[in-house]
Amino acid sequence: MERTLAEMFWDRVGRSADRPAQRVKVGGRWTEVTWRALGEEVRELALGLLSLGRQRGDAVALLSQSRAEWVRADFAVLATGGVTVPIYPTYPPEGIAYIVNDAGVRTLVVEDTAQLDKALRAAKEMPGLDSIVLIQGAVPTGVGGRVPHVLTWDDLRTRGRQARAQLEGTLASNMAAVAPDDVATIVYTSGTTGHPKGVVQTHANHLAALRAAAQVTGVQEGDVHLLFLPLAHSFARLEAFLGIHSGLVTAFAESLEKLAENLKEVAPNFISSVPRVFEKVYAKVLSGVEGGSSVKKKIFYWALGVGREMSRCQQAGRPPGLLLRVRHGLAHKLVFSKLHAALGGRLRFCFSGGAPLAREIAEFFHAVGILILEGYGLTETCPILTCNRRDRFKFGTVGLAFPGVELRIAEDGEILGRGPNIAKGYYRKPAETAEVFKPDGWFHTGDIGEIDAEGFLKITDRKKDLIKTAGGSYVAPQYIENLLKGDPFVSQALVYGDRRPYPVALITLNPEELAKFARNAGLGDKPPAELARNPAVAERVRRTVDAVNTQLASYAQVKRFAVLPGDFSQEGGELTPTLKLKRKVVSENHAELIESLYQS
């Protein structure tokens, strides 16, 4: 059994050799890289890092979008006995400098000249950084001779080939010296406020998570998956590691903008995603239906009704009758097959994590024949705690505990987790570590939830995000926000109301749905920001809010709302790189507007 992630990688290279490992689109064509070729490149990169002076335990940071080279660099670092430090590519120079200095990074791998420019602008603030490796592009004139030393990806590989005879023994001894409890990576949480914290994850943590995931996810050797989430986040990193552990073919999406195109081209067997992607697909499907003819609309909703009936049978473990099977076959041929084809045509299931998935959306996808398995974990748990299974799932929950993981609900409702996947703590932050990593092994997640009689975990909210109204009632804003986003007209929502008499909401709109509504309502072809101020649009949103309120206790109902002129975004600092709302930032940015919602 492998003791470290590097041993896992080389074991896979040896076993799978000439089978495909990665799939990358180059020059408009998808090309495959075998495990043997992947191993050779990782070996050259690792030797190149040693030639730069990297030693066992040294930190190397990766500043790049998700791409094949990210994974190759990751395992090159691990092969040297080093520590990988992911950095989100959206971080500004000062954010990069903070992580580089905090983790003691010696070499920084950057994606392109734009990321290189950010790193060089912060170079004076990173005195410990001695080298930068550029994955794509040429080193700009005048940069090559400076400190930190800048070299290209090919330069690093060349150094590795040239130093092979001299350093191969060092590489082997470094790998052999790494122990399971040694630090493999320090992952900085994107955070919603303040500086990120570095989560210290060991080789043993990750291997425990991978063995548990392999038991319950249903992935099979040779399965193709399309990776498009940010590898700086632990969810995508688990997906990439699972590719190595289980011998999958990892295809790398060109970008989120080209995701729809890449899905058709790659035809993955499964995908992992945050809920935002599923929300957008859901909204686009319903928008297309509502924009179609009355006949098409009638056929779609008939098929959806048949799909829901079939879904209920599957959830109950009850075999469908002959008539239902015949109707379902027709529904698939007329309607569902088109959505399956748009997603590649081979999807067996999808994984969702990183944020809550609305039950309505999970049920919709299952009705059309696509099972979304929602799971739950945090960076601090590498990042597994629970997951729905293909043969045991319950919508509205995040599933059952992974093998080897214990769950407990504290007296105040907080979810606690314990297991070999729990990280060591926060890097150089003993007080913060002691607050949530307890001596008895229980990690305090900060999430509020409940476990039902069958062991399924339901998350109701973040402990710190819970709203306590002026009347003393507790309100879970994420639950209400997900209900609001169940309407394709709504893009994002923020519910606010802590220590206030009632909850209010800030709502952003789906531009496509807004434009369609404007045309049908005779409002003309106006910019979204102007349409957002129109009373007819406000009334349209009011109907959604009223419908949601019927599902809520009186104290939790949204009494007033405002429609914003534009959507929340990473660029505006209102979303994390994994598309979670930064509640404090949004609330501060719109403080006057929120205050106005409480005026008479």
Image: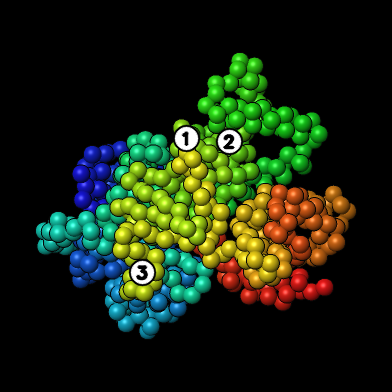
Residue 120's tag is none
Label 1 secondary element? loop
Q: How much space separates mark 1 and mark 3, taking CA atoms?
A: 35 Å
Direction from residue 477 to residue 211 in the image, left or right: left
Whether residue 449 is situated above or below residue 387 in the rendered picture: below
Q: Which of the two discs, 2 and 1, labels the residue nearer the N terminus?
A: 2
Direction from residue 421 to residue 57 in the image, left or right: left
Q: Which of the two discs, 1 and 3, labels the residue nearer the N terminus?
A: 1
Residue, disc 1: 392
Q: Residues within 10 Å of mark 3 (few under 14, many from 20)?
A: some
Residue, disc 3: 433
Q: Where the C terminus falls, by quadrant?
A: bottom right
Residue 283 placement (x, y as % from top left): 67, 47
Tell which of 219 and 502 is nearer to you: 502
User: How did the renderer colour the structure?
Assistant: rainbow
Residue 366's tag is 2
Q: Quadrant of residue 183?
A: bottom left
